[in-house]
Amino acid sequence: MADPAVGRGMRGAEAVTTADGTVAGGSGAGVITRGLRRHVDRVGYHLPAAAVFVGTIVLWELSVSALRLQRFILPPPTAIVAALASEADLLRRSALTTLFEAVGGLAIGVIAGLLVAFLTVRSSTARNALLPVAVAANAIPIIAIAPIMNNWFGVLNPLSKMMIVALLVFFPVMINVTRGLTQVEPSVLELMRSYAASEWTILRRVRIPNALPFFFTALKVSTTLSLIGAIVGEYFGGSSEVLGRVIVQSASRLRFDITWAAIFLGAVTGIVFYLLVVAVERLVMPWHASLRGQEG
Amino acid sequence: MTDGGGSAGETRAVGDPVVSIRGVHKVFQVADGRTRALESIDVDIQRGEFVSLIGPSGCGKSTLLRLIGDLTAPTAGIVTVNGKPARKARLDRDYGMVFQAPVLFDWRTVEGNVRLPLDIMGVRGRERDRRAREMLELVELHDFARHYPRQLSGGMQQRVAIARALAFEPKILLMDEPFGALDEMTRERMNSELLRIWERTKTTIVFVTHSIPEAVFLSSRVIVMSARPGRITNVIDVDLGRPRNEETREQERYFQLVTAVRESLRGRVDGETPVASPDRTMAEGTIG
């Protein structure tokens, strides 16, 4: 799983490292102009994406009225906004409950994934036995067992949705973190050996920092998975005030404006959740910013 | 000086060679049998010496260095470091190691990387920071203390690795082709830099290289090795004066010594291997 941010950030990296001895240092006025330039660069960088987004919305609105599309086929964005306003209460409560299920499941899955990953670090036998199974399990559509989780933990119990999410999230976290903890360069281990470092020291000083990028890659995938898991889990039954039920029930009443409003809310929640993880990632791994060339 | 504990029956007098290698053999088990990586190696390295190990690829020079550092164990023979078995010396943190790759941690700043051994060895607070600063000044990278390794060039990264190796003031510095990945210009500058550091710190240095000029310029002694099996074929005392600088590279004696090392390498190759040409080009090619 490649980190999408790495490829994006390669621009500018050359500017930082030049020939030996002439690396751009942090001299007074240069920092300010550079900071300003970076800011302008950034706005310029996001401009095309913003234009595509706005353009799509406008095109959507115009084509619905131009083609005289029926409202239950595709409601125009304005109708969806209206539904967001009129059903604000229900939608807000539903989104919060679904988010609660997603976050709870994510927490369970991440903790379980981390635990297993750390346990397998000590034993290569356990790792060789577990990793292929985990990779295989990761390939099966786990979401298919949602009805069974509903059956086991109770349709109305949020725990049933959390367990679906936890299962979805467990495998990518476990696989990635195991790789991060074990894929350490042999020369690094030799260096630590030359310091007569203990296994614990190696874990703390080498393996865990080495696994951090792997962990955050998995976590970013997992935030999306957690909302998918929670919403699809709700399709198979649950309290009526969750996004999945709102989507199913409004669709069956042909109130697709509400359906779209719920989908929109789910999308926004997912994006915010994702950005939150990205923010934490940058906080925890400042050196990663240096790889992207965003730090002077 | 620490007592060896007498566990290996080594009773050499204190103050004797820093590194003593006696009758060492190393055999590697490979898919189609065994490779004799090192055979009948006997070497003494004195305190404060700068010794280079030179030879063609596969002559076991890196293996010999790793035996001194107890990163691998001999099949037969005894390696004594600071009067102790090599393993004890490693556990006592008697040596610093520099590899061909800088092996820096991406997640630590330049200063953080230099501090690494101090963190591991429990040096704390102001003392730790002072030493890290001092080492960065020694390799002239104090202006880059807060940079991350990836922001530095290859030569600068290797200087960080040297500062890190010296940070805990080890008695011996083991260097495995530390400048092998650098271009010729940077390499020559790093050579002068290393000599300056060596003269200031008085550390004993064992240096693996496949560059003849580098070996001659740096060393007080050059140990010439041959491959299959890895053996010591010649030991050349480098009687160039100190301090050495760019002028040293133009002295008559310097060229004589370079020729002497090259002929040692070649002589052995001609005597042992029917196909001499690839190794010969290697020996001549590095004259740069």
Image (cartoon, coloured by chain):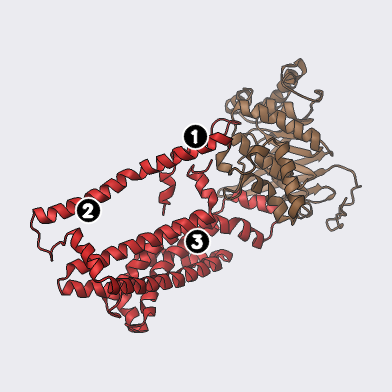
Chain colours: A red, B brown
Chain designation of label 2: A
Please tell me how crowded label 2 is: few (under 14), some (14-19), or many (20+) other residues with Cα within 10 Å: some
Chain designation of label 1: A
Residue bearing mark 3: A177
Q: Is residue A90 above or below residue A276?
A: below
The residue closer to the viewer here, B24 or B64, is B64
Please tell me how crowded label 3 is: few (under 14), some (14-19), or many (20+) other residues with Cα within 10 Å: many
Q: Can the viewer see residue A124 in this picture?
A: yes
Is label 3 or label 1 in front?
1
When asked about the image quadrant of residue B262, the answer is top right
Q: Amino acid at mark 3?
A: Val
Q: Residue at x 61, y 60 (%)?
A: A203
Mark 1 or 2, nearer chain start = 1
Q: Is residue A265 above or below residue A151?
A: above
Mark 2 or 3, nearer chain start = 2
Q: Is residue A130 above or below residue B78?
A: below
Residue at mark 1 to residue at mark 2: CA–CA distance:
38 Å
Q: Amino acid at mark 2?
A: Ile
Check residue A15 in the rendering and tell me which mark sits there, or answer none: 1
